[in-house]
Amino acid sequence: MKSPVQVTITGAAGNIGYALAFRIASGQMLGEDQPVTLRLLEVPQSVATLGGLAMELEDCAFPLLHDVVLTDDLSVGFQDCNYALLIGAKPRTKDMQRSDLIADNGSIFAAQGRAINEHAARDIRVLVVGNPANTNALIAAANAPDINRRNFTAMTRLDHNRARTQVAIKAGHAVADVRQITVWGNHSSTQFPDLTHCLIDGTPAFELVSRDWADDDFIPTVQHRGTAIIEARGASSAASAANAAIDHMRNWALGTDEDDWVSMAIPSDEGHYGIDTDLVFSYPVVCKDGDYQVVTGLEVDDYMREKFVTTEQELVKERDIVAELLKPAG
Ligand code: NAD
Ligand code: LMR
């Protein structure tokens, strides 16, 4: 048996946290040979609620669950942390855009970035889920100058999974037949869910579905799926978000399928596909040996370029709004 790794979940008493903790403890994220210590970080008023979650985790008798730490102290929450899932943040209501959350949520990620810099393992892998996720990841990375920026990522896997299912339904195929789909850019309504290189059972997607359908139906459906769920449930997606977080981290840690790629929002420092080099931008990536690489060399036409620019410009605007939080203290 391997030694336990430290997995931090912030906002663990919330809706996503409740859907996530059990799956990590059961081995679905890091594999069935990897014991975990869960470090559950909350605001002081929710630590008592975490006690209930801890009792339920005990009652599952998960063989891989080495320990559970409950805390409202950032230094304890991130102590020696190997994997951090930064979820704790305010969710939006149906009349809001995710970027409307910046004022309330941005500072949370500055403080957590600083704590990660001080207390976490040097090779920590961070997934930001709390919205607006891309810009919050940029804030966390900027406040952790001693940690490789590559290790700060944001979640667009939920959008990727949504896109996969929508095109599978339209084409009359199983989800498992859909490969090489990409979500580019921001986890927001400007994201670009892209079928250009997508294959369905080996056939180019655009031989099975029309470009008009992609423009008029598929892209807006995926872009606005979060809002549709809030309208229907009265609360934002939780189980599907937790599932996407598991998918993101599992692929990053254990690798992607040989003949496919996934979407991850990552620092754009290398400027792939001509994107501004100081954003957290979603790209197609493949993962191997605990690392990710952007899929390069995909042909980009004018149509795609226009979509890239729209979502890139939104991220630049968000970055301008949080400029003060991007300057590490000291
Ligand atoms: P929730 O309100 O149910 O839970 C949030 C939890 O975070 C609460 O328990 C709260 O006490 C805690 N929290 C708040 N500030 C904290 C802090 N500074 N430190 C630690 N914990 C803190 O919300 P939820 O449904 O779990 O959603 C959480 C976030 O995830 C929201 O911002 C939501 O918009 C976002 N989200 C993102 C995606 C994505 O695809 N990227 C998908 C779904 C939800
Ligand atoms: C989602 O995409 O479901 C989440 O980001 C929640 C939201 O605010 O839409």
Image (tube, grey):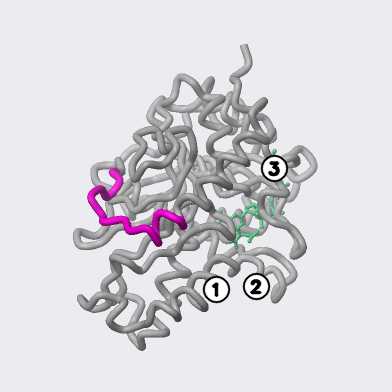
Mark 3 vs mark 1, CA separation in Å: 24 Å
Q: Residues within 10 Å of mark 1 (few under 14, many from 20)?
A: some
Task: Report if residue 295 lies within the magenta region.
Answer: yes
Q: Is residue 139 above or below residue 285?
A: above
Nearer the N terminus, badge 1 or badge 2?
1
Q: Which residues are magenta?
A: 293-307
Percent from the top left, x then y, of residue 164? 40, 71
Q: Could you say whether the residue bearing mark 1 is in a helix, strand or loop?
A: helix
Choose top left, top right, bottom left or bottom right for residue 274: top left
Mark on residue 221?
Answer: 1
In which of the image's four quarters is ligand 2 placed? bottom right
Task: Report if residue 178 lies within the magenta region.
Answer: no
Residue at far top of view: 330
The residue tagged 3 is 102
Percent from the top left, x then y, of residue 13? 68, 51
Nearer the N terminus, badge 3 or badge 1?
3
